Image (cartoon, helix red, strand yellow):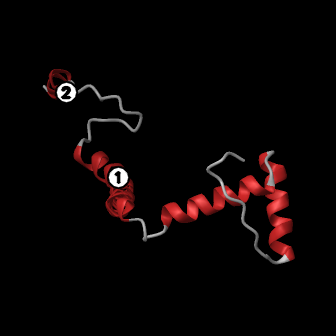
Amino acid sequence: MDSSETPIATVIPAQWLRQLEKLAAEKESSVSEVIKKAIEQYLITNDSNPDLRPLKQQIQQLSEQVQILRNAQHKINHLDLRVCILEKKVLPTLSPDVAEDGEEYEDEPDEVLTDFI
């Protein structure tokens, strides 16, 4: 603890203490450090800090824009699937000179005409 830190005491439920001890062990840290980090995160997200309000507004706007993009991507994926289905149905009917494997049939009009003459 440095000179700018002040010790505090509080009473918490036993369940919280067990959770804090488990988290501290996972993070290879002390319970005190976990509590300090939790308080820090709480204070950062608390609206009482006027310096953070513009940042929070930007985060909210970005979150909304991300959601709009996710919705748009979902619609694009859906439309892409529909286009693929339509291509499979329509393309074979538009081009009778194309085999199922994509190779073109050779049209031999001269041979056909000579066969009839």
Between 74 and 32, the one lying in front of the other is 32
The residue lying at 79 percent from left, 76 percent from top is: 11
The residue lying at 81 percent from left, 45 percent from top is: 28
The residue lying at 35 percent from left, 28 percent from top is: 103
In the drawing, does residue 7 fall left or right of residue 17? left
Residue under numbered circle 1: 80
Above or below residue 98? Residue 13 is below
**Amino acid at the residue labelled 1:** Asp
Q: Quadrant of residue 95?
A: top left
- Where does the image place residue 115, in percent across and percent down from the top left? 20, 25
Between 18 and 6, the one lying in front of the other is 6
The image quadrant where one finds the C terminus is: top left
**Amino acid at the residue labelled 2:** Val
- Where does the image place residue 45, in percent across and percent down from the top left? 49, 64
Q: Quadrant of residue 37?
A: bottom right
Above or below residue 2? Residue 67 is below
Residue 22 seen in the figure: yes
In the drawing, does residue 5 fall left or right of residue 86? right
Cα distance, mark 2 to mark 1? 42 Å
Residue under numbered circle 2: 112
Instruction: Identify the secondary structure beneath mark 1.
Output: helix
Kindly give the residue lying farthest to the front in the view shown. Answer: 3
Residue 63 seen in the figure: no
Instruction: Identify the secondary structure beneath mark 2.
Output: helix
- Where does the image place residue 20, in percent across and percent down from the top left? 80, 62
In the drawing, does residue 1 fall left or right of residue 78? right
